[in-house]
Image (tube, rainbow, N blue to C red):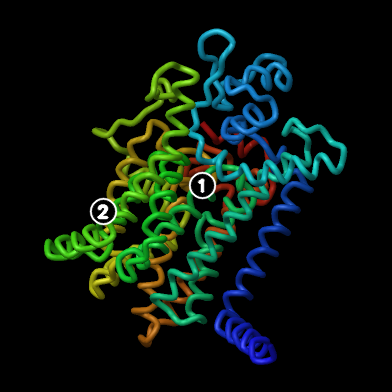
């Protein structure tokens, strides 16, 4: 028994020693997003905890679990007096039925927190309909959880590139120089932070699938892929990273066929796991509309022949490079991935091209919100590029200048985020004139709002 106890102590001490910086980072990340989220809601910088699109995403849970009515009629009659605004994404369909235009993945990920809210509400003798303030605060709590979990897997991915201290530096850049901090706190109720977790987890699984050939990783990747699709369908483009992992020529593709022959039972299991969450979505559509496939966005859609690529990349309204200039070194890092034949490279490049095309082709290509919202989902791609960039440049004499530039990029993004939180930067409609005249302001004035078209 003493030897077993000693062995456990040694394992624990070695684990702490090896993961010391990871533990420090996660602790600080939890503290930062918890404090900021508390301050945001305590000072009513944004309120209530359930709002905008999140009402539609959330509606699955009380409708099915608390009211037992998949048509959502009962919950809308009870909580919205029989009429719910269309901007929530909950739309009338036929007689006495509503259809939620958003897919079901977000609700599946938040479901455990819905039950936690239910239990705490019961203990506090609050209403058990899913709309008590106790229950509603578990919604941003879920987003915070997935922000932490996603950061954990992101750190583990970066271990393939960098030493621990370098990972700490890159992670600090990512949480301050991208929209990640914003969508982990201010807007943690939206599906972007949940998608960030799913896509990051999928990328973490790839080496276990193709290098270590683990059956559990193959099956889990199938489930994660299905959840990615039904959380934000456009993110299905990142599934291309699976077949293109480690592929640089035709022979690499041929070598993957040996994995199919060896692991075909696991691949069948992965296909089943992929279909399961998608089947839930199809079943919902069929129960409401009678159709197995249903396009719930009405007149909203894509114009693939006329994408707003320049606006998405560089415009003051929503340009990702304008609002998040840390993307410049991350993009340079893609070349470093290519030069070093990094196994993530091909999937990242192909996925990024198609993702940019899809984002740019959406009718409301500017999306609204802080920075360009959809890039939050695939921050793992930016992280890998940034890590490759830093690994390549850190031994060079001018590394300190690159470090200063990247830190200034983070300061730029943090400053704009603070202005967005204080309402100086609006949800949409920013012009260069408005941006320049209000750049140093932290106070909202009527004159400034007149500049917004």
Q: Could you say whether the residue bearing mark 1 is in a helix, strand or loop?
A: helix
Task: Residue 104 in the image: state x and y as whole percent.
Answer: 51, 35
Using the image, tell me which numbered label, if any, was put on residue 144.
none
| Residue 98 rendering spot, x and y as whole percentages | 56, 18
Residue that appears at 37% across and 87% down: 397
| Residue 161 vertical placement versus 196 (above, below) | below
Residue at the far front: name it: 1
- Is residue 12 in sight in this rendering? yes
The disc, 2 or 1, on the residue closer to the chain's N-terminal end is: 1
Q: Residues within 10 Å of mark 2 (few under 14, many from 20)?
A: some
Query: Residue shown at 65%/34% (left/top)?
Result: 51
Residue positioned 39% across, 54% down in the render = 219
Q: Residues within 10 Å of mark 1 (few under 14, many from 20)?
A: many
Q: Residue furthest top?
A: 95
Which residue is pictured at 68% across the width and 14% down the height? 82
311 and 220: which is toward the camera: 220
When the figure is inspected, residue 240 is found, relative to residue 74, above or below; the finding is below
Q: Identify the image quadrant of residue 213.
A: bottom left
Which residue in the rendered view is the most extreme toward the left? 250
Residue 95 versus residue 163 in the image, above or below: above
Q: Which residue is mark 1?
A: 192
Quarter occupied by the N terminus? bottom right
Q: Which residue is mark 2?
A: 350
Image-based side of 380 in relation to 128, left or right: left
Left or right of residue 413, residue 82 in this image: right
Q: Nearer the viewer, residue 296 or 286?
A: 286
State how far apart marks 2 and 1 are (Cα): 21 Å
Residue 435 vertical position relative to residue 67 in the rendered view, above or below: below
């Amino acid at each position: 028994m003493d030897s077993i106890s000693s062995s456990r102590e040694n394992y624990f001490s070695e684990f702490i020693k090896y993961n010391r910086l990871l533990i420090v980072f996660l602790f600080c990340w939890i503290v930062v997003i918890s404090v900021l989220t508390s301050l945001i809601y305590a000072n009513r910088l944004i309120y209530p905890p359930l709002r905008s699109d999140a009402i539609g995403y959330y509606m699955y849970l009380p409708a099915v679990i608390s009211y037992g009515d998949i048509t959502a009629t009962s919950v809308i009659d009870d909580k919205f007096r029989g009429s719910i605004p269309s901007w929530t994404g909950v739309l009338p369909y036929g007689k006495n039925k509503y259809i939620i235009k958003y897919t079901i993945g977000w609700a599946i990920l938040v479901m455990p927190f819905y039950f936690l809210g239910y239990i705490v509400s019961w203990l506090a003798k609050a209403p058990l309909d899913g709309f008590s303030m106790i229950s509603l605060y578990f919604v941003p709590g879920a987003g915070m959880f997935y922000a932490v979990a996603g950061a954990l897997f992101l750190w583990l991915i970066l271990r393939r590139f960098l030493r621990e201290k370098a990972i700490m530096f890159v992670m600090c850049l990512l949480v301050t120089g991208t929209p990640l901090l914003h969508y982990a706190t201010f807007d943690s109720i939206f599906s972007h932070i949940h998608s960030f977790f799913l896509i990051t987890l999928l990328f973490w699984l790839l080496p276990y699938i193709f290098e270590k050939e683990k059956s559990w990783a193959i099956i889990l990747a199938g489930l994660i892929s299905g959840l990615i699709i039904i959380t934000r369908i456009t993110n299905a483009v990142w599934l291309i990273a699976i077949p293109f992992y480690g592929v640089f020529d035709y022979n690499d593709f041929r070598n993957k066929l040996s994995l199919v022959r060896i692991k075909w039972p696991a691949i069948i299991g992965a296909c089943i796991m992929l279909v399961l969450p998608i089947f839930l979505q199809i079943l919902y559509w069929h129960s409401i509309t009678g159709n197995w496939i249903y396009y719930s966005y009405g007149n909203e859609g894509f114009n693939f022949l006329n994408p707003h690529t320049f606006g998405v990349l560089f415009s003051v309204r929503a340009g990702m490079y304008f609002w998040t200039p840390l993307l410049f070194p991350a993009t340079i890092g893609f070349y470093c991935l290519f030069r070093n034949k990094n196994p993530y490279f091909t999937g990242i490049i192909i996925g990024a091209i198609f993702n940019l095309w899809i984002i740019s082709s959406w009718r409301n290509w500017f999306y609204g919100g802080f920075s360009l919202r959809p890039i939050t989902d695939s921050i793992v791609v930016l992280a890998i590029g940034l890590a490759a960039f830093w690994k390549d440049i850190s031994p060079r004499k001018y590394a300190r200048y690159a470090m200063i530039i990247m830190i200034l990029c983070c300061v730029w993004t943090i400053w704009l985020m603070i202005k967005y939180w204080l309402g100086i930067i609006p949800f949409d409609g920013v012009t260069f004139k408005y941006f320049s005249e209000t750049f140093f302001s932290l106070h909202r004035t009527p004159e400034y709002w007149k500049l917004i078209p």
